[in-house]
Image (cartoon, rainbow, N blue to C red):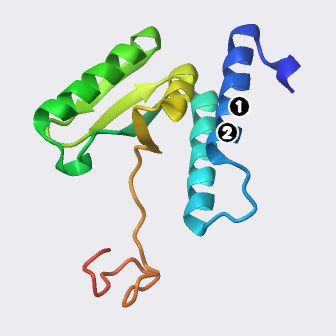
């Protein structure tokens, strides 16, 4: 199948495939959360190759996490954006008080983000579906005991 991919995309395809195999780690004992993360990453990679770009929410590895100070968050965001200057990336949203960026990325940039030690998570920026499997929820999307629809 790789032989059928055009030259510029072939390198990106191989690189992202290797990143997925490494990042997802084919472990014998994986949790449900691991399986969901693997599936989400696969869908994200498929989407970026189908569309040419994809909108993602990138969570940065910042000491202190969500409770980090504004300067540490800004420094981490600027460092990642500088790294991404080599790729086709559009910044959509940069939060001052959260270690999060919302970006539109091409396949190569997505591969870089998935492998970057500066990043703790890359998720598709999409509308979430109602959670009806929580106690008190129903399949019609009405509120449950947690007030989540």
Q: Are marks 1 and 2 in contact (CB under 8 Å)?
A: yes
Task: Please tell me which residue lies in front, 37 or 68.
Answer: 68
At numbered mark 2, what does the secondary structure look like: helix, strand or loop? helix
Relative side of 10 to 43, left or right: right
Relative side of 129 to 51, left or right: left
Percent coordinates x, y for residue 89 in the rendering: 41, 19
When asked about the image quadrant of residue 32, the answer is bottom right
Q: Residue furthest bottom?
A: 136
When asked about the image quadrant of residue 33, the answer is bottom right
Q: Is residue 133 above or below residue 65?
A: below
Q: How far apart are the alpha carbons under marks 1 and 2?
A: 6 Å
Label 2, residues with CA under 10 Å away: few <14, some 14-19, many ≥20: few
Residue positioned 22% across, 25% down in the render: 75
Q: Which residue is mark 1?
A: 18
Task: Please tell me which residue lies in front, 62 or 82.
Answer: 62
Label 1, residues with CA under 10 Å away: few <14, some 14-19, many ≥20: some
Residue positioned 52% across, 22% down in the render: 106
Residue positioned 31% across, 24% down in the render: 91
Relative side of 10 to 1, left or right: left
At numbered mark 1, what does the secondary structure look like: helix, strand or loop? helix
Q: Which residue is mark 2?
A: 22
Relative side of 45 to 10, left or right: left
Q: Is residue 53 above or below residue 82?
A: below
Residue positioned 41% across, 36% down in the render: 119
Percent coordinates x, y for residue 72 in the rendering: 18, 33
């Amino acid at each position: 199948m790789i032989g059928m991919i055009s030259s510029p995309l072939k390198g990106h395809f191989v690189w992202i495939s290797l990143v997925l195999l490494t990042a997802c780690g084919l472990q014998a004992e994986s949790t449900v959360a691991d399986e969901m993360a693997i599936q989400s990453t696969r869908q994200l990679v498929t989407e970026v190759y189908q569309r040419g770009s994809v909108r993602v929410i990138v969570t940065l590895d910042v000491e202190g996490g969500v409770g980090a100070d504004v300067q540490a968050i800004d420094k981490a965001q600027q460092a990642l954006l500088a790294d991404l200057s080599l790729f086709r990336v559009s910044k959509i949203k940069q939060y001052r008080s959260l270690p999060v960026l919302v970006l539109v990325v091409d396949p190569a940039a997505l591969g870089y983000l998935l492998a970057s030690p500066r990043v703790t998570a890359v998720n598709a920026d999409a509308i979430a579906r109602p959670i009806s499997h929580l106690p008190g929820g129903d399949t019609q999307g009405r509120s449950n005991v947690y007030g989540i629809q």
